[in-house]
Amino acid sequence: MIEAILDAKLPRLLGPLPGPKAREVIALDARHLSPSFTRGYPLVARRGRGAMVEDVDANVFLDFAAGIAVAATGHCHPRVVEAIQRQAAELIHISGTDFYYPQMIDLAEKLEKITPGREPKRVFYGNSGTEAIEAAIKLARYATGREKLIAFHGCFHGRTMGSLSLTASKAVQRKGFGSLLSGVFHIPYPNRYRCPLGAGAHDCGDDCIEHLEKVVFKKLVDPSDVAAIFIEPVQGEGGYLPAPSKFLRDLADLCARHGILLVADEVQCGMGRTGKWWASEHSGIEPDVICVAKGIASGMPLGAMIARASLMTWKPGAHASTFGGNPVCLAAALATIDLLEGGYMENARRMGNHLLERMKGWPERFRSVGDVRGLGLMLGIEFVVDRASREPAREFRDRVVERAFHKGLLVLGAGESTLRLCPPLLIDEEQADFAASAIEESISEVERAA
Ligand SMILES: Cc1ncc(COP(=O)(O)O)c(C=O)c1O
């Protein structure tokens, strides 16, 4: 059976989903696991290779979700597996908090090389996106001596109490958890399709900057009290929304003028997914701090906060993590970066353009598709009740996601009514075309049933 999945490039379903073994696991999961997870459909994974995932009943799926944009080099890439195995046989843990090991430096040097800006950088390692953000919050306050933070409506920066204070994605993520960090302000994100300030696609970014300067800085907080502005250059959980380049440049200028640090949360959009190492590179900005996780180690838990060396002046003991930068995760990250450099990042750019070209006519062709957008292999399809009102069609999106699953394609939602495509960066044209056709068919079926 392993051969079947190794060879497969397209899905193969053996029967109705979920199969018998999957149903058993789901029943046990319901009894034993935290009910806080949001499973959209019943995939019970057994193993993965490349862009393919086999479930416990031997059904094979094409994975355009990649474990939430994590499996950048595909599932179990032989070179990543080999790096993990080799490192695990040498040293699994010693804690970089108290001792030294060379892999920490190897990856830091690599990250410094691929991060924009001439100033030397320093790196802090954690185990996740939220830890990279927590580290950035603490560093921003420490380095500036200021307390206030600004983030954007719709943004997702994590679920621990500091990062959750920045997150403004869904109220359920905050409900019942009491007070969060004080001194956090949220401002509109420049969504070109539905500008929160009512502007058109071209002016939305300008209006958001004006709101920050004329409303927030005049009425709520003096810019000299603000330590940092956190932004996802492509808003991920908020709906796969690339911020306009001019907006990002204006924001970077504004930050520089006021001595505010610009923190780019590249946890979902970084590490080559958009066809460049960093999504912020598409606009030419040089953030003061970059937070990265998800795709950095092809599925091993690793997060990093990369900052200008002149900022990272905190004293020994100020911040640390027992597991952060574990040698096995670092080995996976170094292999991942090699593979991205070796062609997968360029493939993300090419396959992203191919898919966008294929999907750009959808808003004319399907009455339920309002917008198609994205950079590289970070693409969003936004569903609406009708194109005139642009009212989000959440249930419609959920039904398309479900239909795609029954055709053997794994995808996820994002935002209120967007379907996201974030496959491994190694997909080929045949797989991209299969995914596009499966989504087209799913949309047609759901439209017919409506
Ligand atoms: C942009 C962004 N930042 C931070 C996080 C939090 O990452 P983690 O779930 O690894 O804590 C996420 C997770 O989806 C994310 O998309």
Image: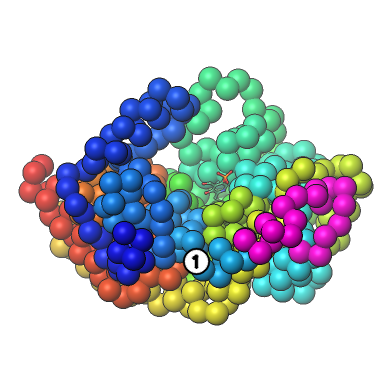
For the N terminus, give its image quadrant: bottom left
Question: Does residue 375 appear to the left or right of 227 in the view shown?
Answer: left
Q: Judge whether residue 379 can be spotted in this image.
A: no
Q: Nearer the viewer, residue 73 or 358?
A: 73
- Name the kind of residue labelled 1 in the image: His
Question: Does residue 189 appear to the left or right of 216 in the view shown?
Answer: left
For the C terminus, give its image quadrant: top left
Segment colored magenta: 84-103
Using the rendered view, name the quadrant where residue 90 is placed: bottom right
Q: Nearer the viewer, residue 303 or 313?
A: 303
Q: Which residue is found at the position 69% from the left and 59% from the top?
A: 89
- Give residue 399's position: percent from left, percent from top: 22, 43
- Give residue 129's position: percent from left, percent from top: 61, 48
195 w.r.t. 339: above or below: above
Say whether residue 124 is magenta.
no
Question: Does residue 160 appear to the left or right of 100 in the view shown?
Answer: left
- Give residue 354's position: percent from left, percent from top: 33, 75
Using the rendered view, name the quadrant where residue 321 is placed: top right
59 w.r.t. 285: above or below: above
Q: Judge whether residue 159 can be spotted in this image.
A: yes
Q: Quickly name the residue at label 1.
A: 77
Q: Which residue is found at the position 58% from the left and 36% from the top?
A: 159
Cβ of mark 1 under 8 Å from ligand 1: the answer is no
Q: Which residue is found at the position 39% from the left and 44% from the top?
A: 415
